Image (spheres, grey):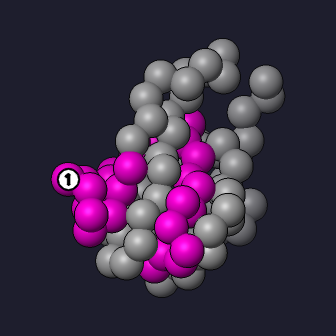
């Protein structure tokens, strides 16, 4: 799936709860900030992803809590997930 973002777009902290729900994306254009959280809601890692950074591709493990924010004027991400897609389990949100 291709996801287009504009500056300030924010995907709130979430995770994928099923054991097969890894997620990978490649930023093809622009720059995004990725934040990884622990189960208590503390930020444990933050980094930039995009052609101008050293990181182009990110993979999240099932259960890994993360958020994404577009910091460039616009960004385009190619997102890959294992199927089948089930709306009931698309995203889970931490209960902080």
Q: Is residue 65 magenta?
A: yes
Instruction: Tell me where residue 23 appears, x and y as whole percent.
Output: 42, 57
Q: Quadrant of residue 8?
A: bottom right
- Magenta stretch contains residue 69: yes
Q: Nearer the viewer, residue 84 or 58?
A: 58
In this rendering, position of residue 73 left or right of residue 60: right
| 25 vs 56, nearest the viewer | 56
Q: Is residue 17 above or below residue 29?
A: above
Q: Please tell me whether residue 57 is drawn above or below residue 83 in the rendered image.
A: above
Write the residue at 36% across / 69% down: 27
Residue at horizontal 73 percent and vertical 41 percent from the top: 93
Name the residue at 37% across, 78% down: 29
7 or 46, nearer to the observer: 7
Query: Quarter of the image containing the C terminus?
Result: top right
Residue that label 1 marks: 54
For the point 55% across and 74% down, which residue is it? 73
* Magenta span: 48-77
What is the x, y in percent for residue 80?
Answer: 39, 70
Q: Is residue 42 above or below residue 53?
A: above
Give the image location of residue 18, x and y in percent. 54, 46
**x and y, in percent, of residue 28 in the image:** 33, 77
60 displayed left or right of 91: left
Q: Residues within 10 Å of mark 1 (few under 14, many from 20)?
A: few
Label 1 SS: loop
Q: Nearer the viewer, residue 27 or 78?
A: 27
Q: Is residue 10 visible?
A: yes
Q: From the viewer's perspective, is 57 left or right of 80?
A: left
């Amino acid at each position: 799936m291709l996801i287009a973002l504009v500056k300030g777009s924010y995907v709130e902290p979430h995770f994928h709860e099923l054991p097969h729900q890894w997620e990978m994306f490649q930023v093809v254009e622009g720059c995004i900030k990725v934040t990884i959280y622990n189960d208590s809601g503390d930020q444990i890692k933050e980094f930039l992803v995009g052609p101008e950074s050293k990181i182009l591709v990110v993979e999240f493990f099932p259960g890994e809590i993360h958020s994404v924010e577009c910091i460039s004027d616009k960004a385009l991400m190619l997102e890959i997930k294992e199927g089948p897609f089930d709306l009931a389990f698309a995203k889970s949100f931490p209960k902080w």
